[in-house]
Amino acid sequence: MDTEKTLLQQIRDKEQEFAHKIDTAKKEADVVVTAAKTEAEELLCTADAEGKKSAELVYWNVRGKTAVDIEALTKAAESDRTAVSERGERNIPAAAERIVRYVTME
C-alpha cells in the first residue's frame, strides 16, 4: 500500500498540477498583456506623430493660401487707391473753380 498513493494524495497531486498550469497560464497572459500595452503605446506615439505631421502640413498649406489671398487683397486695394487718387486729381481743377466762385460769390 505504500507504493500506491492514497486518494487524498492523488487529489493533492492533481491540485498541484492544475495550480502549476494556472500559474503558467497567468505568466503567459501577463506576457501577452504587457506586449499588447507596449504595442498600444507605440501605436499611440505613432498616431500622435502622424497627427502632428498632418496638422503641420495643413497649417503650412493654409498659411500659404492665406499669404496668396493677402497679396491679392493688397494688390486690389492698391489698385482701388490709385483709381480713387486719379479721379481726385482730375476733380481738383473743377473743385478749385467752385470754391473760388463760392468765395467770390459769382
Image (spheres, helix red, strand yellow):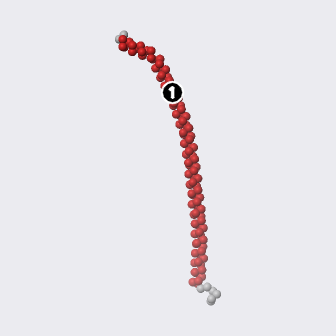
Which residue is pictured at 51% across the width and 30% down the height? 74
Above or below: residue 54 compared with residue 104: below
Which residue is pictured at 38% across the width and 12% down the height? 101
Asked which secondary structure carries label 1, the reply is helix
Q: Residues within 10 Å of mark 1 (few under 14, many from 20)?
A: few
Outermost residue, left direction?
105
Q: Position of residue 42 (x, y in %)?
A: 58, 56
Q: Quadrant of residue 8?
A: bottom right
Q: Position of residue 43 (x, y in %)?
A: 58, 55
- For this rendering, which residue is in front, 67 or 35? 67
Q: Position of residue 33 (x, y in %)?
A: 57, 63
- For this rendering, which residue is in front, 96 or 13? 96
Above or below: residue 43 compared with residue 92: below
* Residue, disc 1: 78
The C terminus lies in which quarter of the figure?
top left
User: Looking at numbered disc 1 in the image, what kind of residue is underneath it?
Assistant: Glu
Which residue is pictured at 51% across the width and 31% down the height? 73
Outermost residue, right direction?
3
Q: Position of residue 45 (x, y in %)?
A: 57, 54
Above or below: residue 55 compared with residue 28: above
The N terminus lies in which quarter of the figure?
bottom right
